[in-house]
Image (cartoon, helix red, strand yellow):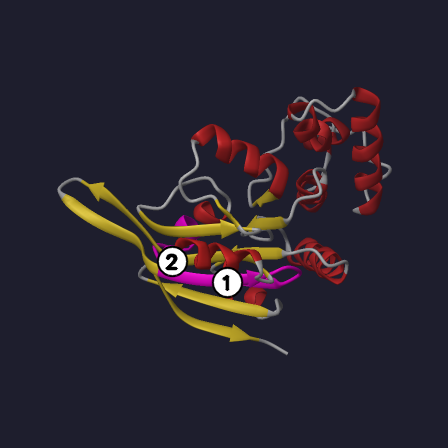
Amino acid sequence: MNSNKKTAISGSEDLVMLRDISKHYKSGEEEVRALDCVSLSIKKGEFLSILGPSGSGKSTLMNMLGCLDTPTMGEYYLDSKDVSALSSHQLAGIRNQSIGFVFQSFNLLEYASALENVALPLVYRGVKSAERKKKAAALLERVGLGDRMNHKPNQLSGGQKQRVAIARALVNDPQIILADEPTGALDSKSGADIEALFNELHQEGRTLIIVTHDNALAQRTKRIINIKDGKIIADERLA
């Protein structure tokens, strides 16, 4: 039976497959079900959003997809590999190689230049300095910041900081870009610019997952996974 399951997974077009994923934790004497038997598949090249209010379980689901946490029960296959029971060290390796994160608060090093921030994940992979700089510079050009490479975060606008964060997310050529409220801290024009950049990345064949409470932002992706009380209540594909 197990061999049949592995055959089915290896022959799948799905980049992500969650099977009956649950996450429970204790809050005092109470057991909280942050996720409750969630099943979900995502194909390579999809551009989708995970939509839900605060407390819906969307952040917990994001942590599962990003290999930042492990499930209490269930299976998570990433590119046919079961990652649901890996050690913290193994998960760190998966995150660095396969997942690019974009956060609402940017998470940039304030003392480092835009170029150094983008190159940082390559340091962890042991890439030589010259190659790091070359790749980081090319990505900053790609996101429209070729003239801001040596600027530090306090010299950049919110929209520019988010572009640096997106370039950093791309530097290891990840299988998934996972963005948590990526326009939440931006003004409307900067937010629209970031959305346009995500659309360009989607056109290039990137797999993008946006986690948000903003229905208008979700409507501009190609698929909406609606989550409430730890369960997926709707899965809508948009034109």
103, 11: nearer the viewer: 11
147, 219: nearer the viewer: 219
| Rendered-image quadrant of the C terminus | bottom right
> What is the x, y in percent for residue 10?
56, 56
SS class, disc 2: loop
The reply to whether callout 1 and callout 2 are in contact (CB within 8 Å) is: no
Tag of residue 5: none
What residue does disc 2 label? 1
* Residue 55 appears in the figure: yes
N-term mark: 1 or 2:
2
| Rendered-image quadrant of the N terminus | bottom left
Tell me what residue is drawn at x 79 percent, y 47 percent: 143
Position of 173 with respect to 141 (left or right) is left
Position of 148 with respect to 197 (left or right) is right
Please identify, in this view, whether the residue under mark 1 or under mark 2 is nearer the observer: 2
SS class, disc 1: strand
Tell me what residue is drawn at x 57 percent, y 49 percent: 178
Residue range in magenta is 38-61
What residue does disc 1 label? 41
The three-letter code of the residue at mark 2 reads: Met
The three-letter code of the residue at mark 1 reads: Ser
Tell me what residue is drawn at x 31 percent, y 61 percent: 229
